[in-house]
Amino acid sequence: MWVRKRLDIGWGDLAWAAGRCLVPDLDGGASRRTETAWSPDGDALFCLSVRSGFDLLLTALDLPRGSEVLMSAITVPGMVRVAEAHGLVPVPVDLDPESAAADPASLARALSPASRLLVAAHLFGARPPLDPLLEALAASEHGRGLMVVEDCAQAWTPGYRGDARAAVSMFSFGLIKTATALGGALLAVRRPDLAERMRAAAERWPPQRRRVVFAKTAKAAAFKALSARPPYALITGLAAAAGRDHDLLVNRLAKGFPGPGFLERIRHRPASPLAALAARRLGRYDPGRLARRAAAGAALAAALPPPVSRPGRAAPHATYWVFPVLSDDPERTRRALARAGFDATRGDSLIVVEPPAGRPELEPVRARDLLLRTVYAPLYPELPRSALERMAAALAADASAAGAPAADPPRTAAVPPAEA
Ligand SMILES: *Cc1c(COP(=O)(O)O)cnc(C)c1O
């Protein structure tokens, strides 16, 4: 069984990180070194996570309660929770399924006199341009001059630091992200006054404990050891024999801040081993690895017959952080892939941003449909060409057996699909 995801980190980095947790820390400058290594411009801020950095940003901005934060309609739940914790109102901007980017027309509709911020997420490892969104903002009375924040958590590539027209660009090094450092995030904060206030807010947070980083290292090592094909086949087989689905368990393992007390957990300064590991990853990342992943994704995409549709298929700079496919019956597609030896998942880490009370017309119909119908196929550089071919064949057979081709999401729909 090919595991759904292989962590993007080697044994050498894990051993090094464990070692850093064991030696005493003599200077506290690891975060600063990571920041300057990433951005010589001095605009970088290293945080515990993107969600922590977003929390710092909202603290620094200190927007009036009830201010509206426009967000790409699909994101991780923590981003919405952080906005709500600051008394702000998240407002979804529906997605264009072709690019998986926020759609400019939906943005124009979502703008209101209370709009203060746009958080544009680049999903699935592609990087659609911000231009259509910036043009929609410039064309609108409520959009002109609106602050734009870029969520590049899924879109890191070596050397890229975001679109300079965004006030802030955020990159994640969480466990399942590209070039993972087992956590941590780098933010390019292009307004020095804002960066200063964010730093001051971070200073008030307690430090992350080094043993937390050590535990993350151990967890990643276990995950990595069990992701090889034979042990993973054994795990899924045992779970099935016990009448259990391994899906939930595996997805839970991938969460960075599981359990209660989410806000307290994200509100820490990164421990120095975490910052040092991030710097090491940035400095030594093999661009060939990303190129191999992108090539595998492009090969799989090219091998799929037309009835198989993919969200974000038209987005440029695709590195295929994940490989989502749309299905009219995602559970059936997931089982078909499992029979062929591929551990696809329907995923549970992304959510649809709900429209604010009293504004049902902002229901993000296309984003919700997209998320309900998405199955994530395994995709990583270790997958050989023969496995990609078998996966393409399994997806094609599933789509044609379904009879009705998996059509693209509706451009407009009168009735929002029911909650799954
Ligand atoms: C992973 C992710 C985040 C959160 O990143 P953390 O560093 O884990 O907080 C935010 N937005 C998107 C779109 C993500 O995929």
Image (cartoon, rainbow, N blue to C red):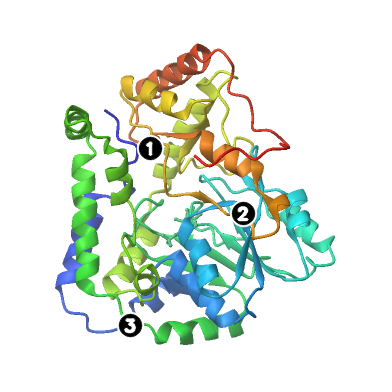
Asked whether disc 1 touches disc 3, contact meaning CB atoms under 8 Å apart, the reply is no
Q: Earlier in the sequence, mark 1 or mark 3?
A: 3
Label 3 CB sits under 8 Å from any ligand 1 atom: no
Check disc 1 and give the amino acid type: Tyr
Mark 1 vs mark 2: in front: 2
Q: Is residue 139 left or right of residue 127?
A: right
Q: CA distance from mark 1 to mark 3?
A: 36 Å
Check disc 3 and give the amino acid type: Pro
- Label 3 element class: loop
Asked whether disc 1 touches disc 2, contact meaning CB atoms under 8 Å apart, the reply is no
Check disc 2 and give the amino acid type: Ser
Q: CA distance from mark 1 to mark 2?
A: 26 Å
Classify 10 Å Cα crowding around label 3: few (below 14), some (14-19), many (20 and above).
few
Of residues 73 and 14, the one nearer the viewer is 73
Q: Earlier in the sequence, mark 3 or mark 2?
A: 2
What residue is rendered at 64% in x and 40% in y?
416
Looking at the image, residue 412 lies above or below residue 81 = above
Residue 148 drawn at (x, y percent): 66, 66
Residue 403 drawn at (x, y percent): 55, 12
Classify 10 Å Cα crowding around label 2: few (below 14), some (14-19), many (20 and above).
many
Kindly identify which residue carries mark 1.
380
Q: Earlier in the sequence, mark 1 or mark 2?
A: 2
Q: Can residue 316 be seen here?
A: no
Query: Which part of the image, by quadrant, shows the N terminus?
Result: top left
Label 1 CB sits under 8 Å from any ligand 1 atom: no
Residue 390 drawn at (x, y percent): 38, 18
Looking at the image, residue 368 lies above or below residue 151 = above
Kindly identify which residue carries mark 3.
206
Label 2 CB sits under 8 Å from any ligand 1 atom: yes
Kindly identify which residue carries mark 2.
72
Q: Is residue 314 left or right of residue 243?
A: right
